Image (spheres, coloured by chain):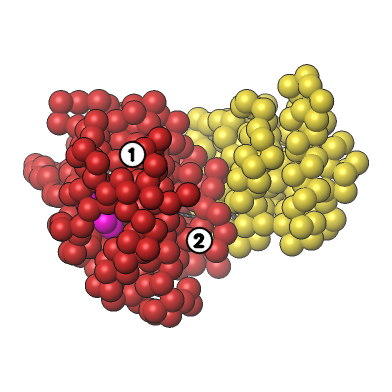
């Protein structure tokens, strides 16, 4: 199929883009890696595409006082190769190789991924895990929304039609933080069937303050409510980690779809969690002997 | 409704100007308007990689970019990559190793390989990873990986 007709504008300035977005039926065109596909399949019919690819102010990964800023024109490939991201937001660097394929990463953007809010996408899950802040701008107004409040349903967010995500700000990783990431996909680089992201703080011989996010299984990234009391001790055994994973995944309510039944996804998430906990444990306490091989 | 835009860009080393409708994607523009049919269309929604071309040196799905968006860019298709000789070694290796059968996926695979080989010498795993965005329904990929690995070895001056 071919895309329906639409009007197209490519402003150089943010202010002009925001004023164009004030019109009914106007939509941002960022990397186009989801939007143009949906146009080709006639799943969307915008009146006007506002191409933001020439707006210089939206470029750039910056190490700022309030965190690491990723502008709306930063592409997956830029994040993948950024030394700032590798050092300051290591969880992003761990997840990026799982995001799409080289050609798609060359154009697709971090902020576009947040705006789309695909339930199987990595960026929304990481923004929730790390408590990122999403900056939304429209003509004459700017607001910041916590990622944990931004994702509201299947492809639904707190963003209004006339608002653009101009940047997302990830907090800098602390020295005592340890991260984990894993996902299952049919083909490397495809959207995940189910995936998990974990952040923990290391205190002496334990990892605590766990934040666990499960994605791909429900309409929005699921920040597990049941983790505040959980700890990963340096000597926790494999069965103990498996029990923790079971307890966390018990709260899931996965969507059934062509990628699997609810209980299948719950089991898959438990396996990913168990492996990731073990991996985090061995990275955090390397050389300390952790109760298993 | 049409929304025509004038564009000027470099295509395979030559400058091109055209008036394009906003809704026209780059693959259709290349094939139908410019009659460069070496760029193939499989899925038209970003999954198969048959339509990959190089835009400013980077592999890009031409079905997921609008023709109007290449204004000011350098685009290279399989026709230009062939004519310039810059991937002649890859093409020879593909032939030698039988890395194509029907050939439908090959222009896109070569665009991916062309970008991959501009960087450091890739490992076999990195070659497989890069190819994860290109479907080939004939070869089973093994021969494609072999061919790219051979060229990577030769270009980096060592044994394959
Ligand atoms: C084969 C294939 C595999 C993929 N695999 C993955 C994967 O594994 N994981 C993954 O996360 N993604 C994957 N993607 C999607 C890819 O990452 C997209 O690029 C991304 O989801 C959307 O970013 P974009 O910049 O391309 O946005 P676009 O396609 O340009 O836009 C997507 C939507 O967001 C809106 N939008 C975009 N930017 C903004 C903004 N700044 N402000 C407001 N609205 C905005 C658009 O209006 C549109 O509705 C895949 C895509 C393909 C084709
Ligand atoms: S035709 Fe473009 S990716 Fe399949
Ligand atoms: S050679 Fe036939 S699809 Fe690859």
Q: Nearer the viewer, residue A43 or B137?
A: B137
Residue at screen point 43% across, 80% down: A261
Residue at screen point 79% across, 42% down: B146
Q: Is residue A150 in view from this perspective?
A: no
* Coordinates of residue B63 in the picture (x, y in percent): 56, 53
Pointer 1 chain: A
| Occupied quadrant, residue A65 | top left
Residue at screen point 32% across, 61% down: A240
* Coordinates of residue B59 in the picture (x, y in percent): 59, 39
Label 1 crowd (10 A; few <14 / some 14-19 / many >=20): many
Query: Where does the N terminus of chain A fall, quadrant-wise?
Result: bottom right
| Occupied quadrant, residue A67 | top left
Bounds of the magenta span?
Answer: A210-214
Mark 2 secondary-structure assignment: loop
Colour of chain A in the image: red
Q: Are marks 2 and 1 on the same chain?
A: yes
Residue A284, label in figure: 1
The answer to whether A209 is drawn above or below residue B152 in the figure is below
Residue at screen point 15% across, 58% down: A229
Which chain gets the yellow colouring?
Answer: B
Main secondary structure of the magenta stretch:
strand
User: How far apart in space, not on screen, are marks 2 and 1 (Cα)?
Assistant: 27 Å
Magenta segment: does it hold A122? no
Pointer 2 chain: A
* Coordinates of residue A18 in the picture (x, y in percent): 20, 43
Mark 1 secondary-structure assignment: helix
Left or right relative to A183: residue A69: left
Label 2 crowd (10 A; few <14 / some 14-19 / many >=20): some
First in residue order: circle 2 vs circle 1:
2
Label 2 sits on residue = A185
């Amino acid at each position: 199929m071919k895309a329906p007709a639409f009007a197209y504008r490519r402003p150089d300035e943010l202010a002009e883009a925001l004023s164009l977005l004030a019109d009914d039926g106007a939509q941002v065109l960022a990397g186009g890696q989801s939007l143009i596909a949906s146009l080709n399949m006639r799943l969307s019919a915008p009146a006007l595409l506002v191409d933001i690819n020439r707006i210089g102010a939206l470029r750039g990964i910056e190490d700022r006082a309030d965190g690491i800023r990723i502008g709306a024109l930063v592409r997956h490939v830029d994040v993948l190769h950024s030394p700032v991201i590798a050092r300051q937001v290591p969880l992003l660097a761990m997840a990026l190789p799982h995001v799409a394929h080289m050609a798609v990463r060359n154009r697709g953007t971090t902020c576009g991924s947040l705006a789309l809010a695909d339930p199987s996408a990595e960026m929304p899950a990481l923004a929730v895990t790390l408590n990122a802040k999403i900056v939304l701008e429209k003509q004459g107004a700017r607001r910041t929304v916590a990622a944990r409040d931004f994702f509201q349903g299947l492809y639904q967010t707190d963003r209004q039609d006339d608002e653009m995500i101009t940047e997302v700000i990830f907090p800098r990783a602390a020295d005592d933080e340890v991260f984990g990431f894993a996902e299952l996909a049919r083909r490397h680089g495809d959207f995940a069937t189910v995936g998990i992201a974990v952040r923990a703080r290391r205190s002496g011989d334990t990892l605590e303050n766990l934040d666990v996010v499960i994605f791909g299984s429900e309409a929005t990234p699921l920040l597990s409510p049941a983790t505040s009391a959980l700890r990963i001790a340096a000597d926790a055994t494999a069965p103990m980690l498996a029990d923790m994973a079971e307890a966390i995944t018990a709260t899931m309510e996965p969507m059934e779809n062509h990628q699997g039944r609810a209980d299948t996804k719950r089991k898959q998430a438990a396996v990913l969690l168990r492996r990731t906990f073990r991996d985090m444990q061995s990275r955090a306490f390397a050389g300390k002997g952790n109760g298993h091989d | 409704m049409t929304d025509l835009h004038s564009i000027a860009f470099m295509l395979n080393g030559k400058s091109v100007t055209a008036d394009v409708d906003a809704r026209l994607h780059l693959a259709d523009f290349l094939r139908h308007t410019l009659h460069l049919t070496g760029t193939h269309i499989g899925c038209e929604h970003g999954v198969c990689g048959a339509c990959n071309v190089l835009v400013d040196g980077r592999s890009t799905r031409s079905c997921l970019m609008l023709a109007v968006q290449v204004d000011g860019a350098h685009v290279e298709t399989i026709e230009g990559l062939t004519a310039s000789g810059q991937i002649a070694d890859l093409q020879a290796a593909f032939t030698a190793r039988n890395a194509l059968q029907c050939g439908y996926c090959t222009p896109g695979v070569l665009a991916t390989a062309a970008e991959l080989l501009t960087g450091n010498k890739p490992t076999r795993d990195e070659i497989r990873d890069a190819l994860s965005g290109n479907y080939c329904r004939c070869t089973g990929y093994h021969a494609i990986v072999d061919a790219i690995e051979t060229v990577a070895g030769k270009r980096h001056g060592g044994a394959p």
